[in-house]
Amino acid sequence: KTWKLNRNCEIMMTKSFTIVFLLFQPVNSLSQQKVLVCQNKDCQKRFSSFSSGEGGLTQMIADLLPPEDSKSFIIEASGCLSNCGKGPNVSLNDRTFNGVNDVQTAAAVLEVGGGIDCPIALMVAVDMIGQACRTTNEKKLKILTSVIDSLEKSNASNSNAMSHALINRADAHLDANNPSAALKDTSLAIEINHLSGRAFRAKADAHEALGNIAGASEAIERWAEVNPSFSTKAKKELMRLAAK
């Protein structure tokens, strides 16, 4: 099966692999590259949530970036990029790509538009993280542990994908009533990405489950610092914890 990302790139899918035909030379990596992900409802409904789980296409693109390139990209949600009938749409360095609906296509966009070579290990990890979000908690733990073990053995041990997998596994540990394991995973995730609001929120839940109200309150405060949009919720949580 062959289709166009845009007039400059074609992708051919076979049963075993994907071939990306570049019809122009990919751009060199820039000091700061900007990715816009269309949030129009008509565009978003064409994105298979199974592909990446929570966070959608924005999270998928962030997870696909190799650690050495992640700080060179700004990934933002945007208004309509037009042509939503061919969405999901992504703009990279002012070049719009249509039909970005799975890991392989998103990786191709980063290569064509940003000159980024996504390692196979990251592509597989991102796909498995998506699968883990759509199964039972027991299977979720097994899948995410496999992802984390694989990334630890690769050059992606400090990647966004690793942080994402650790946070998701922490949530699974909390659901399995294992807050100690969840606390460990959130701490590791924060070491990779100290601006992860989800990691601090899960860390607060783990501390509270362990009876450490002071630790939970500190994590909630950090959650509000990195995600100011949740400041009101954070204040309510701090009041609830203080009443314990």
Image (cartoon, rainbow, N blue to C red):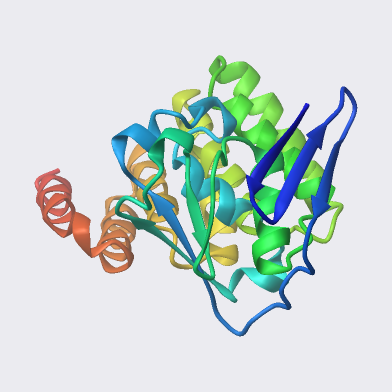
Report the side of 112 relative to 93 (left or right).
right
* Residue 29 location (% of width, % of height): 70, 77
Q: Where 125 falls versus 201 (above or below)?
A: above
* Residue 52 location (% of width, % of height): 56, 36
Residue 32 in view: yes
Report the side of 12 relative to 16 (left or right).
left
Who's the residue at 72% across and 62% down the image?
66
Using the image as rendered, state which of residue 137 and residue 129 is in the foreground: 129
Report how many numbered discs are placed on residues in the image. 0
Q: Where 193 falls versus 68 (above or below)?
A: above
Q: Which residue, as the protein is rendered here, is positioned at the far right?
A: 16
Who's the residue at 39% across and 39% down the image?
84
Who's the residue at 73% across and 60% down the image?
111
* Residue 232 location (% of width, % of height): 11, 55
Who's the residue at 38% across and 53% down the image?
81
Which image quadrant: the N terminus? top right
Using the image as rendered, state which of residue 112 and residue 75 is in the foreground: 112
Using the image as rendered, state which of residue 49 and residue 45 is in the foreground: 45
Q: Where 235 falls versus 243 (above or below)?
A: below
* Residue 130 location (% of width, % of height): 59, 31
Q: Which residue, as the protein is rendered here, is positioned at the far bottom?
A: 31
